[in-house]
C-alpha cells in the first residue's frame, strides 16, 4: 500500500470525532458544562493558551524540521487568536480569566511518550497532541450542538471544525516519521489508553 493511499485512508477516518475516540464523552457532560459556563470558558481559554505554548515548544525541540516549524508557527498564532476570543467572551460576561487549574488528563497522556529512540518520542508527542485535539474537537462539537445561546453555538461549531483540522495536522506530521501503518497502529494504542484516562476523569465543566 502506498503512503498516499494510506494517508487518504487515515484522513477518511477523521470525518467525525466519534470515529476516532474509543470512549465518547457522556451526554451528561454537556449539562454540567452548561451549568457553569464561566468555569468552562476559563478552562477553555487556558487550553487554547497551552496549545499555543505546545506548538512553540515543538518548534524549539525540532527546529530542523521545516514542515513542522512552519505548521506550528501558524498553529500558535491561531491558538492565540482563539485564546483572545474566549477571553473576550469571559469579559463580556463580567468574568476574568482566573488561574489555571491544571489538566491531569493531558499530564497523564504525556507520560505515555516513549523515552527511547528520539523518533519514537517525537511520534508519540505529535500523536498525543493530536489526540488532545480530537478530544477537544468532540467536546466543542457537542457545545456547538447543544448550547442554548445561538452565538455560543455558532462560535463552538466553528472552533470544532478548527480542532478537526488540528488533529489531521498532527497525524500527518507524525506520518513523516514512519509509515502510515506504523503510525496508525501506535495511534490506536494511544487512543485505547486515552479512553481509560478519560474514564478516570470526573464530569466537570472543562474541555478535558
Image (spheres, helix red, strand yellow):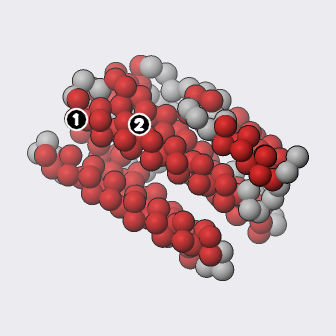
**Residue at (37%, 25%) from the top-left corner?**
145
**Residue at (49%, 22%) from the top-left corner?**
26
**Residue at (32%, 59%) from the top-left corner?**
81
Residue 199: image quadrant is top right
Residue 153: image quadrant is top left
Q: Is residue 95 left or right of residue 59?
A: left
- The answer to whether residue 75 of the structure is visible from this angle is yes
- The answer to whether residue 113 of the structure is visible from this angle is no
Q: Nearer the viewer, mark 2 or mark 1?
A: 1
Q: Residues within 10 Å of mark 1 (few under 14, many from 20)?
A: few
Q: Position of residue 39 (x, y in %)?
A: 28, 39
Q: Is residue 44 left or right of residue 131?
A: left
Outermost residue toward the right in this view: 1
**Residue at (54%, 66%) from the top-left corner?**
71
> In what element is the residue under mark 1?
helix
Q: Is residue 114 left or right of residue 136?
A: right
Outermost residue toward the bottom in this view: 64
Q: Position of residue 38 (x, y in %)?
A: 24, 39
Q: Residues within 10 Å of mark 2 (few under 14, many from 20)?
A: many
Q: Front-most of 125 and 101?
A: 125
Residue 152: image quadrant is top left
| Mark closest to the chain's N terminus, 2 or 1 | 2
Q: Position of residue 185 (x, y in %)?
A: 80, 43
Q: Is residue 66 left or right of residue 140?
A: right
Q: Position of residue 181 (x, y in %)?
A: 83, 47
> In what element is the residue under mark 2?
helix
The label number, if any, that marks residue 34 in the structure image: none
Q: Which residue has dot 1 on it? A: 151
Q: Which residue has dot 2 on it? A: 140
Amino acid at each position: 500500500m502506498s503512503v498516499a493511499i494510506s494517508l487518504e485512508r487515515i484522513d477518511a477516518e477523521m470525518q467525525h470525532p466519534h470515529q476516532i475516540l474509543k470512549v465518547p464523552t457522556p451526554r451528561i457532560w454537556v449539562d454540567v458544562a452548561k451549568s457553569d459556563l464561566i468555569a468552562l470558558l476559563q478552562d477553555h481559554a487556558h487550553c487554547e493558551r497551552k496549545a499555543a505554548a505546545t506548538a512553540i515548544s515543538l518548534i524549539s525541540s525540532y527546529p530542523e524540521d521545516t514542515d513542522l516549524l512552519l505548521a506550528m508557527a501558524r498553529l500558535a498564532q491561531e491558538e492565540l487568536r482563539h485564546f483572545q476570543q474566549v477571553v473576550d467572551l469571559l469579559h463580556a460576561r463580567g468574568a476574568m480569566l482566573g488561574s489555571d487549574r491544571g489538566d491531569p488528563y493531558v499530564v497523564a497522556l504525556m507520560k505515555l511518550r516513549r523515552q527511547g529512540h528520539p523518533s519514537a518520542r517525537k511520534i508519540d508527542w505529535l500523536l498525543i497532541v493530536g489526540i488532545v485535539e480530537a478530544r477537544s474537537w468532540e467536546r466543542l462539537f457537542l457545545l456547538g450542538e447543544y448550547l442554548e445561546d445561538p452565538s455560543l453555538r455558532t462560535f463552538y461549531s466553528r472552533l470544532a471544525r478548527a480542532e478537526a483540522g488540528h488533529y489531521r495536522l498532527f497525524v500527518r506530521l507524525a506520518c513523516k516519521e514512519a509509515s502510515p501503518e506504523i503510525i496508525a497502529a501506535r495511534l490506536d494504542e494511544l487512543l485505547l489508553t486515552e479512553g481509560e484516562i478519560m474514564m478516570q476523569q470526573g464530569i466537570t465543566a472543562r474541555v478535558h
